Image (cartoon, rainbow, N blue to C red):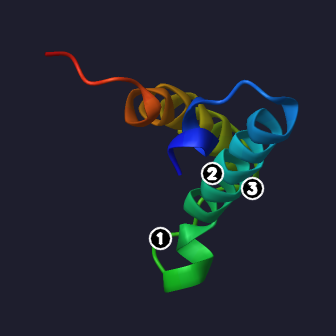
């Protein structure tokens, strides 16, 4: 897992981007998955982008060395 989060090899960078995209789409479609208040279709890509922007530094922190 640590190699997945820290490696700069193209396959790991692509994998991280795909995971972030999948999580972003799941969050953007949460209203369909559990029946909450409908989210307008035009807002779904924005939500996906925001989730990916938040996940990128979070994944970097998880893969980084702890500060002592």
Residue for badge 1: 37
Closer to us: mark 2 or mark 3?
2
Q: Relative to 9, does residue 1 appear above or below in the rendering?
A: below
Report crowding for label 2: few under 14, some 14 to 19, many 20 or more residues within 10 A (C-alpha).
Answer: many
Provide residue 21's location: percent of width, then percent of height: 72, 48
Report crowding for label 1: few under 14, some 14 to 19, many 20 or more residues within 10 A (C-alpha).
Answer: few
Q: Is residue 47 left or right of residue 35?
A: right
Provide residue 24's location: percent of width, then percent of height: 63, 51
Residue for badge 3: 41
State the residue at coordinates (43%, 33%).
58
Q: Relative to 17, does residue 28 appear above or below in the rendering?
A: below
State the residue at coordinates (50%, 43%).
2
Q: Relative to 58, does residue 1 appear above or below in the rendering?
A: below
In which quarter of the view is residue 32 placed? bottom right
State the residue at coordinates (86%, 31%).
10
Closer to us: mark 2 or mark 1?
2
Q: Is residue 1 left or right of residue 4?
A: left
Numbered circles on residues, count: 3
Q: Which mark is residue 24?
A: 2
Residue extending furthest toward the bottom: 34
Q: CA distance from mark 2 to mark 3?
A: 14 Å
Label 2: element kind = helix
Which image quarter is the C terminus in?
top left
Provide residue 27's location: percent of width, then percent of height: 55, 59
Q: Nearer the viewer, residue 42 or 60?
A: 60
Residue extending furthest toward the right: 10
């Amino acid at each position: 897992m640590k190699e997945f989060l820290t490696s700069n090899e193209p396959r790991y960078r692509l994998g991280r981007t795909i995971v972030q995209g999948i999580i972003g789409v799941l969050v953007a479609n949460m209203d369909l998955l559990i029946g909450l208040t409908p989210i307008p279709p035009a807002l779904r890509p924005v939500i996906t982008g925001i989730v990916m922007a938040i996940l990128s530094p979070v994944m970097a922190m998880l893969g980084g060395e702890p500060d002592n």
